[in-house]
Amino acid sequence: MIKTDVVIIGAGPCGLFQVFELGLLGLKCEVIDSIRNPGGQCAELYPDKPIYDIPAIQICTGQELTDALLQQIEPFEYGMTLNDEVVIIERQSANNFFLETSSGKKFQSKAIVIAGGVGSFQPRQLRVNNVEQFLDTSLHYRVQDSSVFRDKRLVVLGGGDSALDWVLDLVKITREMTLIHRRDEFRAVSASVSKVRKLHAKGKINLIESAKVSELIGKGGQLNFIKVVTKDGLESKIEIDNMLIFFGLAPKLGPIADWGLDINRKTINVDTEKFQTSETGIFAVGDINFYPGKKKLILSGFHEAALAAFAIKQQLEPNKKVHLQYTTTSSVMHERLGVKD
């Protein structure tokens, strides 16, 4: 049994910043996430994509933001359990919760913060026979290292922003680039669509619309060819080395839906004073929560994490006033941060 002050469900940017805000107030945390690495969607799906709206940071990638947040929480005592999912939450008393993960790991905490982003999410799959044979070798649902596509024949499937953004980025290094979209209209922003069509007109991108992949051909995990069928029934065979698939995400609340919280479609209703859910002691920050005027922005989630931390501290120590202290001048904060005055 791992005992802690707060269990944070979700290791995305808001969950990591929640560790920081709670740490400043002297509270210990355990972070649990179903994905394999910290960073949430930023690191899992868009590690190389630029982010422009983090205060005081002109530009950073999803992975750079994750790395900076991990560095920021280094002074604090916290644990992190990844590739595991919370399946049981039970209240044992007013400020005492029992949690268990799918692997059987057990936790006891005084409060819970749900920072699960869009919940448990998985990329929508390509439904073709033997797709598993090539998964994570020559067929991918995310870009982990763009250099592996250098001088390769790359096929990108999809018609949204992610698909077109990666086409426009990777066409600079690939030997041959092909974009295949199931429909005849794109869901991406018009500027990206215009750029793709111009590159196609110049012969720098192969563009196949209203078509789908019907067969994958290769061996030993390496794709060699794919067969493509248009909606008119015309079939063609394309020689390729790698494939990227961007059919979007299928968000699911997963076990969260069974925890007795006030659910609003696929989000959790919270108040705007404490960001507490309908259950006392359980809070929600980031994209997973909902309240009037909610904006799904990382900076909004950071604000929510700060207020939730103060609310948790006050709830756990009701007889003490929680004073607002500034990291610029507070010797207590400096001590917790490991800063020498």
Image (spheres, helix red, strand yellow):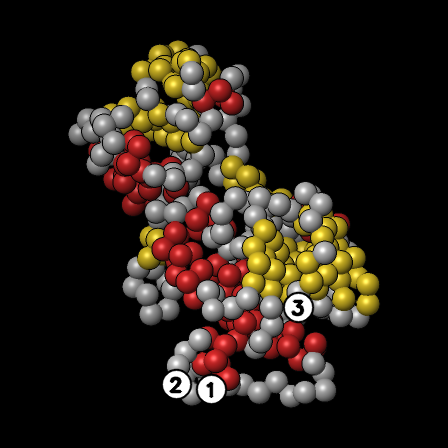
* Type of the residue with mark 2: Asp
In this orientation, which residue lies closer to the viewer: 201 or 244?
244
88 versus 76 height, above or below: above
**Res. 26 visible in picture:** yes
Q: Which residue is mark 1?
A: 331
Q: How many neighbours does mark 2 have within 10 angstroms: few (below 14), some (14-19), or many (20 or more)?
A: few
Q: Report whether 53 appears left or right of 265.
A: left
Residue for point 38% across, 38% down: 143
Q: Amino acid at mark 1?
A: Ser
**Which numbered disc covers residue 341?**
2
Percent coordinates x, y for residue 302 in the rendering: 49, 67
Residue at image coords 51%, 61%: 16
Residue at numbered disc 3? 5
Asked whether the residues under the numbered discs 2 and 1 touch, taking CB atoms below 8 Å apart as contact, a structural biologist would say: yes
Q: Is residue 318 left or right of residue 230?
A: right
- Quarter where residue 269 is shown: bottom right
Q: Regarding mark 1 in the picture, which secondary structure is present there?
A: helix
Q: Amino acid at mark 3?
A: Asp
- Tell me whether the residue at label 3 lies in contact with that at label 2, contact meaning CB atoms closer than 8 angstroms: no
- Residue 257 visible? The answer is no
Quadrant position of the C terminus in the picture: bottom left
Q: CA distance from mark 3 to mark 2?
A: 28 Å
* 3D distance between C-alphas at marks 3 and 1: 23 Å
Q: What is the distance, in whole Å, between disc 2 and disc 1 at their CAs?
A: 7 Å
Dot 2 or dot 1: first in sequence order is: 1
Residue 191 position within the rendered picture, expressed as x and y whole percent measured from the top left? 29, 45
Mark with earlier residue (3, 2): 3
Badge 3 element: loop
Q: Position of residue 25 (x, y in %)?
A: 57, 77
Q: Secondary structure at mark 2?
A: loop
Q: Residue at x 17, y 29 (%)?
A: 202
Quadrant location of residue 245?
top left
